[in-house]
Image (cartoon, helix red, strand yellow):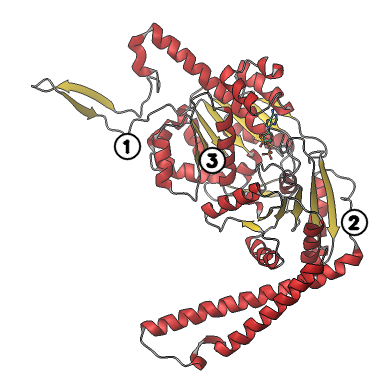
Amino acid sequence: MEDWKCMNIRTEILNALKLKNFTKPTKIQSESIPPAIEDQRDILGAAETGSGKTLAFAIPILNGILNARSNESISEESDMETESDSELGSDNENEPEVLEELDENGLGCVSVVNLPPDGFVKPKNKLWAIILVPTRELAMQVKNHIDDVAKYTGINIAAIVGGLSSEKQERLLRKGPEIVVATPGRLWELIQRNEPHLMQLNKVKYFVIDEADRMVETAHFPELHLMLEKINLKRNNKRQNFVFSATLTMVHKAPYRVNIKKKKHIKKNLSPEDKLKSLIQLIGMKNPHVVNLTTANCVTSTVKEMQIFCSVKEKDAYLFYFLKRNPGRSLVFCNSISCVKRLASILNILKLTPLPIHSNMIQKQRLKNLDKFRANDRGLLLATDVASRGLDIVGVNHVVHYDVPRTAEIYVHRSGRTARASNIGLSLLICTPDKKNVYLNVLRTMKREKELPRLEIELRLIRTYHVVVKLAQEIAMLEEKSKKETASTNWFSKAAEEMEILLDEDELPRGMGKGDLQKHNKLVNSKRKQLDLFLATTK
Ligand SMILES: Nc1ncnc2c1ncn2[C@@H]1O[C@H](COP(=O)(O)OP(=O)(O)OP(=O)(O)O)[C@@H](O)[C@H]1O
């Protein structure tokens, strides 16, 4: 623990680190934490995926809150008279002026003057830190990660994300958590509703943007922009800012769009320096300490990168081949929700029990599937890029880019879900002729001179895999058809029943009467039996 101790970290935090068996800081931590704690510098940090960036900003925040609390209690002891100012500071202009008077019976009676916005309730605690992240799952994970290190500090952390009940989240905020980890959309919604705890936004002492490049380049930007305006309004000058990402300094060859408040589009080819500068300006960072540990390779050195080049028709068979021949915990990325859904039904038929995750699923199901994936060392997660950033799942052995990622950043973040915290892992990209240009562009952005090595395939086996997968595709299509037919027949029969109309079989929609349906189901069953036989003999 010696390397931690010389960083002026409080014992409460050191004890939690020891419990986690984090005996020494990672490189990004040892280069960010000292200037953040000792000189209260803003930090602009870039380091590869899985390198421990979360604690690089969380430890200085927890440490700072603990130190400030100690100082407050010392000054409270020496001057009990100033006690009422200590929680929020005496300059809280949002606070209503409360006058206490005594009625003729000597009972206290309170009159409130100078009323603030509707429904103002005085916040319970000071809001010390806001941490913004791009996805809901990441917010939960960052909260849990900080909870572990805050175990002995008495500091409370809340995750505020979309997709879950906003009433429940307002209840969480009413408890006055010192640190709020949030996605921009839900946070902005609650700010607009004048949620009391969040009314202290412009007084936060710490502000973090994690996965910063993603946050400024996507749909999150309008809310982020508005929020930054609000935070910078009458800002607390002593605010310390942290901006972190694994791909902060990458440059796109293609122009990218930034959508701002008035729906103006700004097209820019930003150099790494420009990109950093614009972020620094937007957040109002002053003279940040820059820690850039990104490597020339962009992807962690312990990731083995491979590729398969095949036709669009062959993709599913190669994916199935890879998953069968390489047992372990695998994460497969697609570019669209429809692709995740289609693959999920095929891989289900092939008995691989995939767990889908995409933004059209209800949040609770998304979190449930992530938990199941975490708990199973042979788990298979099928995801869109909602899962490509920041998710820290121990023991992901393989990442498969079923679709070629649209940018190098996405490639780096997806690949970073494996080989975390110095472990090893494999990243496999499946490329088809129509996507060759995108793939080459990804390599160019990463300044790679050579293509990724090809994965060796046992051609003797792949033929059987083609047959098996084709059968599964047919079953998936037949089942989809009968699902649709059943749904529309049920709807039609129910409507007829409600209107008390008696229907003949030939009056049912699209002509798939009971007889047709039975034939259809028989066909599905025989194909399933055939498949089961194949699966039993496929290695
Ligand atoms: N000092 C440490 N010693 C050992 N393990 C650590 C240490 N710090 C963090 N870790 C572990 O390393 C893993 C990766 O950490 P973290 O999620 O912060 O990475 P990251 O750099 O933010 O990754 P990404 O860019 O993908 O978001 C986590 O499982 C975390 O618990």
Picture quarter with ligand 1: top right
As measured in the structure, the alpha-carbon distance from the residue carrying label 2 to the one carrying label 3 is 48 Å
Disc 3 marks a residue whose amino acid type is His
Q: Is residue 86 above or below residue 173?
A: above
> Given this view, does label 2 or label 3 mark the residue nearer the observer?
2
**Residue denoted by label 2:** 456
270, 473: nearer the viewer: 473
Residue at image x 77%, y 38%? 423
Q: Quadrant of the C terminus?
A: bottom right
What kind of element bears circle 1?
Answer: loop
Residue 364: horizontal and vertical position, in percent?
52, 52
Q: Which mark is residue 117?
A: 1
Does 533 sit left or right of 105 as displayed? right
What kind of element bears circle 2?
Answer: loop
**Residue denoted by label 3:** 225
Q: Is residue 373 above or below residue 3?
A: below
What kind of element bears circle 3?
Answer: helix
